[in-house]
Amino acid sequence: MRVKATVLVDNYAYGINGVIAQHGWAVFLETERGNFLFDTGAGKTVLNNAIVLGVDLASIEGIILSHHHHDHTGGLLEVLEYLRRPVDVHAHPDLFKDSYSTRHGKISYSGMPFRQAVLEAKGARFKLGREFRSVVPGLYLTGEVPRLTAYETGDPDLVINGENGLVQDPLADDLSVVIPTDRGLFIVLGCAHAGIINTLNHAMKVMGQERIQTVFGGTHLGPANEVQREESIRSLLRMNIARLGASHCTGLNTAARLAYEFGQRFVFCGVGTVFEA
């Protein structure tokens, strides 16, 4: 399948007048089977950036949410209000769970900022599932990603309520988009909370392909510990990746390291970055 992806929301914006940077992530996907919005940012930027970039959000066939965190779901209500029609929203059943961040010694709510009933009243038709599945022919969701590497241990600062207090959130709801193309897999990450290596290995296994034409999005290597960061970079370099784009939760230092290691195969993914395959 041919695909064009435009970054609508990211932590950084440069070179395009009028777009707004935001700690968050959203991508507009144009495919032969229809257009889709992958994540929605944290709110108040996705519509502005779509207009500035000439992206027709009204054309989307559905919305895909990588996971429940507010910096990926916070723009959902405004997109629904803009569409003013029913639209399928594909996500994991944990979309509405409560979760928190304890980073920098502060506890803050990090989950979906809207109740399900409010979103459904605005036209959201939730399609929730845990399994690897097709959204339309040629566009797939990874479903829950098996955690197989020893070094991708998740983020201890992201927590949920357990029986005896706050415990690390396993973030089983972490999903990525996989599109097979003539030149390999086209993979769009949300935050790769399952670990970028776990995610890519899972995508390659279920699709039966080892060549990755493009992978881009949040890698969550910015907050990762040094062991995970180094092992992940080494594993990425061993993979057959033609183009790697880093954004959002990758962090500037890690992105610079990846740019050094991957050279011309690396792309910084600020607002307005376009990938085609």
Image (cartoon, helix red, strand yellow):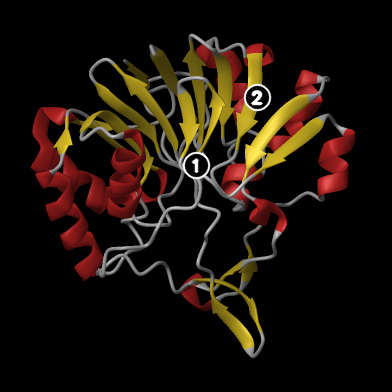
Residue 132 relative to residue 47: left or right: left
Three-letter amino acid code of the residue under disc 1: Phe
Viewer can see residue 210: yes
In the picture, the quarter occupied by the N terminus is top left
How many numbered circles does the render carry?
A: 2
Task: Tell me the number on the disc at residue 14.
Answer: none
Secondary element under disc 2, as helix, strand or loop, is: strand
Mark 1 is surrounded, within 10 Å at the Cα level, by few (under 14), some (14 to 19) or many (20 or more) other residues, namely: some
Residue 57 relative to residue 143: left or right: right
Q: Percent from the top left, x then y, of residue 138?
A: 45, 21
Looking at the image, residue 43 lies above or below residue 81: below
Q: Percent from the top left, x then y, of residue 29?
A: 49, 20
Residue drawn at x 48%, y 13% is: 31
Looking at the image, residue 222 lies above or below residue 120: below
* Viewer-side residue, 181 vs 45: 181
Mark 2 is surrounded, within 10 Å at the Cα level, by few (under 14), some (14 to 19) or many (20 or more) other residues, namely: some
Residue drawn at x 54%, y 46% is: 131
Disc 1 to disc 2, how far (Cα)? 17 Å
Q: Percent from the top left, x then y, of residue 254?
A: 24, 52
Say whether disc 1 or disc 2 marks the residue closer to the N-terminus: 2
Viewer can see residue 9: no
Residue 265 relative to residue 126: left or right: left
Q: Which residue in the structure is indicated by mark 1?
A: 132
In the picture, the quarter occupied by the C terminus is top left
Three-letter amino acid code of the residue under disc 2: Gly
* Viewer-side residue, 65 vs 133: 133
Residue drawn at x 59%, y 40% is: 65
Task: Tell me the number on the disc at residue 62.
Answer: 2
